[in-house]
Amino acid sequence: MAKVALVTGSTSGIGLAVAHALAGAGMDLALHGLVSPDEGDALAQEFKSQYQIKTLFSDADLRNADSIADLVQRTQVELGSLDVLVNNAGIQFTAAVEDFPRQKWDDIIAINLSSAFHTIHYAVPAMKKAGWGRIVNIASVHGLVASVNKAAYVAAKHGIVGLTKVVALENVETGITCNAICPGWVDTPLIAKQIDAYAEKEGLPLEEAKRKLITDKQPMPDMTPPENIGQLVLYLCGEFARTMTGTTLPIDGAWTAQ
Ligand code: NAD
């Protein structure tokens, strides 16, 4: 039987690349993200015909715990199980702590941190029964170090690193591993907004703004292609990674080496 993966936020960026990597390895897929049902269904159909796998699409809003419970249950019922859970969906907002809007704080904590608790909470019992499971949390370098103006994001990402370690420890004898990936700059729509804003603020051409913004924190001036994160997730799903659990894996152009 093919393994079944749920990748949150897989309509865009890193999540979409992770979905391609897992589908390429023959896994059935629950695709998820905030796009219209038509767009989501078209994406699910595209994956189905490209990879000859079973798919579903959900636009569950991850700020709502009941919707998350439904998402996990729907995956298990419609695709037969949930073996690989990738908590990837996330948003960003930047402002100094005294200017940080309360709603933005609540949304970022809900989407970037609490949603991973809820998916794991609902997915683990069946993984335990099956004696096998892989949980991969897409954290960030901001799960390991901080930057100014990112109070909610840094708090959520440090939180998900802690959650990863607890889930790993609780499952050392169950066949389930839980790891966090900590990317530096990755070329996705989430980052494009930050580059546009920086270019406008500094009055710089886009390419120069991009290089300056990246190298301000990350020694290697290249962004990580999202596909590279997909391959790392795939590695963590394999049997070679059976004893790799509770780790935080930077893929960050030496950002956190400093
Ligand atoms: P993206 O903006 O391209 O994609 C985000 C995805 O999350 C989309 O599918 C979107 O629909 C979904 N999403 C957002 N809000 C949601 C909500 N309320 N309910 C359900 N789904 C929702 O972003 P990305 O750059 O691919 O980021 C993916 C993850 O990687 C995030 O957790 C982000 O923090 C992390 N990350 C990104 C970078 C980077 O440089 N891009 C670096 C480190 C970590």
Image (cartoon, rainbow, N blue to C red):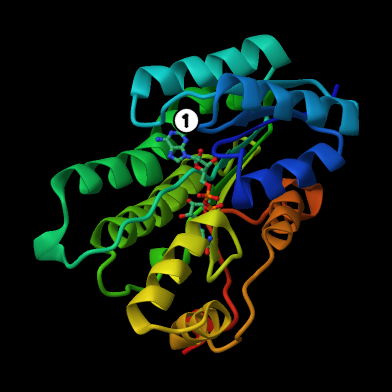
- Locate residue 219, reporting x and y percent: 54, 89
Q: Residue furthest left?
A: 98
| 97 horizontally vs 226: left or right | left
At 46% from the left edge and 43% from the top edge, which residue is drawn?
A: 167
- Label 1: which secondary element: helix
> What percent of the width, then of the height, locates residue 194?
42, 66
Describe residue 231's horizontal placement relative to residue 112 as left or right: right
**Relative height, residue 142 to residue 220 (above, below):** above
Within the image, what quadrant is residue 63 found in?
Answer: top left
Asked whether, in this view, residue 182 is left or right of residue 97, the answer is: right
Query: In which quadrant of the rendered image does the N terminus lie?
Result: top right
Q: Is residue 129 visible?
A: no
Q: Amino acid at mark 1?
A: Thr
Crowd class of label 1 (few under 14; some 14 to 19; many from 20; radius 10 Å): many
Front residue of 226 and 204: 204
In the picture of the structure, the residue carrying the numbered disc 1 is 119
Q: Residue 72: which quarter of the image?
A: top right
Residue sitting at x 63%, y 16%: 76
Q: Percent from the top left, x then y, of residue 229?
A: 67, 58
Above or below residue 228? Residue 238 is above
Q: Position of residue 87 (x, y in %)?
A: 52, 42
- Nearest the viewer among 73 and 121 is 73
Q: Nearer the viewer, residue 187 or 230?
A: 187
The residue positioned 32% from the left and 74% from the top of the image is 147
